[in-house]
């Protein structure tokens, strides 16, 4: 097949997306596909390119320098586009995607997982991997997710949503310490703080509001962290995430050796099964199809809490979904093929 791997963009998870894109591109090429990797924002600026023959000719992959210990400088990225236009899709991106059999969505974060790109591709009749625009939008907004979880009796930490103009004192939140403060629609734990004092609360609010105008404040659950992938409404084995230091923040997610990951997780069979059942239920409630990954906490008393759904799980060398699939005997290349297969089912086609 002719496949576009769409990566990069302008979210705080840009660097992670480029690594996902690079890894997926390599895997799909090894499986015999003709693959073009595109930075969705920078695009391909050679206007003289013959798009009809571009998969045979090929183009250079976007450059990336790995995942540093901090979020990327988005203003510096914007300056790289020579035409200085402000549109999200870079030169020739839509044209090249229209020429593909399917687009593999390697985007993460805003304008990648929030449904806007999916909606645009729908309008152009472009097939892509992962869930559609509406389910992506609902899952990306942690406030909406929390409301839907509560209405469906999916266990989730007690919390509230605050807009910047509604920012209030700790006392006025009605919540008690310790708490977690995080951007409503962010990812990769960017802007997330664990709050144990009033001073930390004020600092955490300032930090979260750097990234968005809406934040989640919720009960801090002390315990073990887990994740469960779901492919085609079938739950994968549970994986446990245990950071060597601190919590599962941006650096611990992507720096090799920062986190101990165990799959299958060391859990009683009924607890693991319950977590898998909740993960599938989340897919039903948020109308997620094809594939996704749900994050969980289990407190010291054994109570489970679902934190969020990830509609485009990371596919980096340290990512969780590939580790879960490997337990079932599915290597990375086969996983990429499977994600394309289940995605094509939506369009009445099969890989």
Image (tube, rainbow, N blue to C red):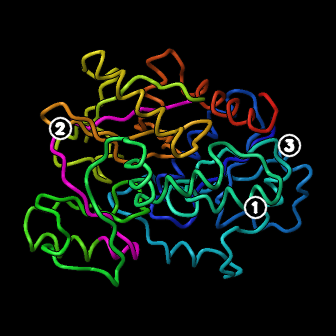
**Taking the image as drawn, is residue 28 in sight?**
yes
Residue at 36% across / 26% down in the picture?
A: 238
Residue at 25% across / 54% down in the picture?
A: 158
Q: Which mark is residue 299?
A: 2
Labels 1 and 3: the sequence-earlier one: 3
Which is in the foreground here, disc 1 or disc 3? Answer: 1
Which is in the foreground here, disc 1 or disc 2? Answer: 2
Asked if the residue at tag 2 contacts the one at tag 1, i.e. Cβ–Cβ closer than 8 Å, the answer is no
Labels 3 and 2: the sequence-earlier one: 3
Q: From the viewer's perspective, tell me whether residue 140 is left or right of residue 341.
A: left
> For the magenta stretch, what is the residue range?
208-231
Asked if the residue at tag 3 contacts the one at tag 1, i.e. Cβ–Cβ closer than 8 Å, the answer is no
Locate the N terminus and report the quarter of the image it occupies: top right
Alpha-carbon span between mark 1 and mark 2: 45 Å
Q: Nearer the viewer, residue 206 or 61?
A: 206
Q: From the viewer's perspective, tell me whether residue 205 is left or right of residue 120.
A: left
- Quickly name the residue at label 3: 56
| Overall secondary structure of the magenta section | strand
Q: Position of residue 162 (x, y in %)?
A: 33, 72
- Quickly name the residue at label 1: 93
């Amino acid at each position: 097949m002719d496949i576009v791997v769409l990566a990069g963009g302008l979210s705080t998870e840009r660097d992670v997306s480029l690594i996902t894109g690079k890894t997926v591109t390599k895997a799909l090429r090894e499986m015999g596909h003709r693959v073009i990797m595109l930075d969705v924002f920078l695009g391909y600026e050679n206007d003289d390119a013959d798009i009809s023959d571009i998969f045979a000719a090929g183009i250079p992959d976007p450059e990336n320098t790995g995942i540093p210990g901090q979020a990327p400088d988005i203003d510096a990225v914007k300056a790289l586009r020579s035409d200085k236009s402000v549109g999200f899709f870079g030169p020739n991106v839509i044209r090249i995607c229209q020429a593909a059999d399917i687009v593999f969505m390697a985007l993460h974060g805003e304008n990648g997982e929030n449904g806007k790109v999916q909606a645009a591709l729908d309008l152009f009749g472009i097939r892509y991997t992962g869930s559609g625009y509406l389910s992506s939008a609902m899952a990306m907004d942690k406030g909406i997710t929390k409301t839907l979880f509560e209405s469906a009796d999916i266990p989730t930490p007690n919390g509230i949503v605050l807009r910047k103009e509604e920012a209030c004192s700790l006392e006025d939140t009605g919540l008690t310490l310790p708490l977690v403060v995080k951007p409503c629609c962010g990812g990769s734990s960017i802007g997330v703080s664990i709050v144990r004092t009033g001073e930390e609360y004020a600092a955490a609010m300032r930090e979260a509001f750097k990234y968005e105008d809406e934040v989640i404040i919720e009960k801090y659950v002390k315990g073990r962290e887990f994740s469960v992938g779901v492919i085609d409404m079938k739950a994968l084995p549970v994986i446990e995430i245990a950071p060597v230091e601190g919590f599962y923040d941006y650096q611990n997610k992507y720096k090799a050796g920062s986190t101990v990951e165990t799959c299958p997780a060391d859990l009683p069979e009924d607890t693991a099964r319950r977590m898998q059942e909740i993960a599938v239920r989340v897919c039903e409630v948020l109308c997620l199809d094809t594939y996704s990954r749900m994050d969980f906490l289990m407190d010291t008393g054994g109570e489970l809490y679902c934190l969020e759904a990830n509609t485009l799980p990371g596919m980096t060398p340290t990512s969780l979904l590939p580790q879960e699939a490997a337990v079932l005997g599915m290597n990375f290349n086969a996983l990429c093929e499977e994600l394309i297969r289940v995605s094509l089912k939506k369009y009445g086609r099969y890989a």
